[in-house]
Image (spheres, grey):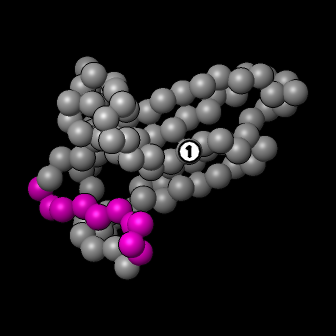
Amino acid sequence: MVLFLPGKGLVIYPDIGDKLDIICPKADQGRDYEFYKLYLVKREQAESCSTVLDPNVLVNCNKPEKDIKFTIKFQEFSPNYMGLEFKKNVNYYITYGVSVFMLR
């Protein structure tokens, strides 16, 4: 289930085993491009739109020359030591930072 809640943003309710694809689109030459970073943060950080305390970068959209797809898999255990792990019935929060550049 996916909802957009005023004052809270996009809220999703994934099940363990679900995947979330995040697409960083290719930029148009000669136009401004927004470089996004998505962070997994604590609730307090999400509410204040802060990434200062212990940021965990999930996605870094920093390659404007091509489309990039990131997939987040909601799993309780990861075979990868750097992999993400999510527990059932626990809330997780994602926020972002952005920089704007002109591509030539």
Q: Secondary structure at mark 1?
A: strand
Rendered view: 56 above or below 83: above
Magenta segment, principal secondary structure? loop
On the image, which quarter does residue 3 sit in? Answer: top left
Query: 54 left or right of 31?
Result: left
Q: Is residue 28 visible?
A: yes
Residue at 25 percent across and 61 percent down: it is: 86
Q: How many marks?
A: 1
Query: 94 left or right of 86?
Result: right
Query: 72 left or right of 59?
Result: left
Residue numbers of the magenta segment = 80-89
Query: 68 left or right of 21?
Result: right
Q: Is residue 5 visible?
A: no
Image spot of residue 69 (x, y percent):
59, 55
Image spot of residue 50 (x, y percent):
34, 27
Rendered view: 33 above or below 38: above
The residue carrying pointer 1 sits among few (fewer than 14), some (14 to 19) or many (20 or more) residues within 10 Å by Cα, namely some
Front-most of residues 15 and 88: 88
Image spot of residue 80 (x, y percent):
41, 75
Please identify the quadrant where the C terminus is shown.
top right
The answer to if 18 sits in the magenta stretch is: no
Residue at 27 percent across and 30 percent down: it is: 45
Front-most of residues 74 and 46: 46
Residue at 70 percent across and 44 percent down: it is: 63
Q: From the image, tell me which residue sits under label 1.
A: 60
Q: Amino acid at mark 1?
A: Asn
Image spot of residue 85 (x, y percent):
29, 64
The answer to if 88 sits in the magenta stretch is: yes
Rendered view: 104 above or below 37: above
